[in-house]
Amino acid sequence: MKALSKKEQLLSAFAASSKVGGGVLTLAEIAFYLNTQNNIALRKLLTDCVKKGMVRRLAAGIYESTLTPPDPMTAIYKVAKKVRGGVLNYISLESQLSHTGVISQIVMGRVTMMTKGRTGTGVFQVS
């Protein structure tokens, strides 16, 4: 039986993650799935996969597979969770009220997160 290449292992990790409700992985998670270290070789592999269109870079150190992307309805929340993974964060009241239709303002493709971490704005294009 032929051993899988690193690219095939990477796509397999994304597919497995997508099956269990994930689909958005950090650089550290990818290193774990591939049983390797977060080093220059791994970053070069990811850069090559991005150039070939196999993987999409959503933010610094956050990736999704183009072949098995996350659910579009929840992808933005997964990305926000990964960006602010080390601190408490939650969806703002305005975003939740808009999502449930309680207020008339409907924000498309944007979510406001409250966080105990540093302030900032991120713009992500998720499929």
Image (cartoon, grey):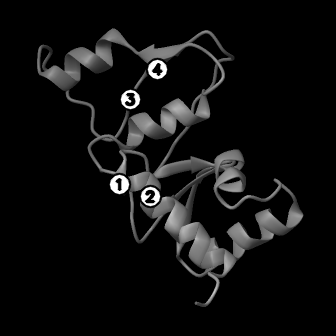
Q: Nearer the viewer, mark 1 or mark 4?
A: 1
Tell me the crowding category of disc 2: few under 14, some 14 to 19, or many 20 or more residues within 10 angstroms, Cα based: some
Q: CA distance from mark 4 to mark 2?
A: 27 Å
Residue underneath mark 3: 111
Amino acid under disc 2: Ala
Residue underneath mark 2: 16
Q: Quadrant of the N terminus?
A: bottom right
Give the left or right position of residue 19, taking residue 46 as reference. Answer: left
> Do the numbered discs 3 and 4 sit on residues whose CB atoms are within 8 Å?
yes
- The residue most toward the right is 40
Q: Nearer the viewer, mark 1 or mark 3?
A: 1
Residue underneath mark 1: 19
Q: CA distance from mark 3 to mark 2?
A: 26 Å
Q: Secondary structure at mark 1?
A: helix
Q: Is residue 43 above or below residue 20?
A: below
Amino acid under disc 1: Lys
Looking at the image, can residue 126 be seen?
no
Q: Nearer the viewer, mark 4 or mark 2?
A: 2
